[in-house]
Amino acid sequence: MEESTIYESYEKIKSKIDFEIFLRLLLNDFEKNKSDWDNDNLEDFLSGLYGYNFESDDSIQPTWKLFAEMLLAARVYE
């Protein structure tokens, strides 16, 4: 079976289990592709997460997919 990318996994998120699968793939991506992450340490990652969330629309209902979107964005958001 071919391994899903984090983006393919993100697109399929509909449940907590889907989110957990996404998190595993995100961790694997960090381990294998850390150099592709602009925010590759905790301080920068949390700063990116804060910045992305600060710029987000407050009217959006939180979902597992939204949490995943925030984590994906935190990898590179400045």
Image (cartoon, grey):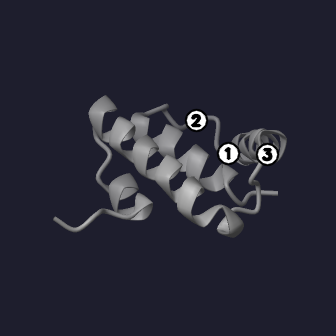
Say left or right for 24 vs 29.
left
Establish if 8 lies above or below 18: below
Query: Mark 1 highlights which residue?
Result: 56
Question: Residue 11: x, y in percent?
Answer: 35, 57
Q: Between 41 and 44, which is closer to the camera in this rendering?
A: 41
Query: Mark 2 highlights which residue?
Result: 59
Q: Quadrant of residue 31?
A: bottom right
Q: CA distance from mark 2 to mark 3?
A: 17 Å
- Asked if marks 3 and 1 touch (Cβ < 8 Å), the reply is no
Question: Residue 46: x, y in percent?
Answer: 76, 39
Q: Please state which of the two labelled residues, at mark 3 or mark 1, is closer to the viewer.
A: 3
- Tell me what residue is drawn at x 72 percent, y 48 percent: 52
Query: Mark 3 highlights which residue?
Result: 51
Q: Residues within 10 Å of mark 1 (few under 14, many from 20)?
A: few
Establish if 1 lies above or below 39: below
Element on which disc 2 rests: loop
Q: Quadrant of residue 77?
A: bottom right
Q: CA distance from mark 2 to mark 1?
A: 9 Å
Q: Quadrant of residue 56?
A: top right
Element on which disc 1 rests: loop
Say left or right for 77 vs 28.
right
Type of residue at label 2? Answer: Ser
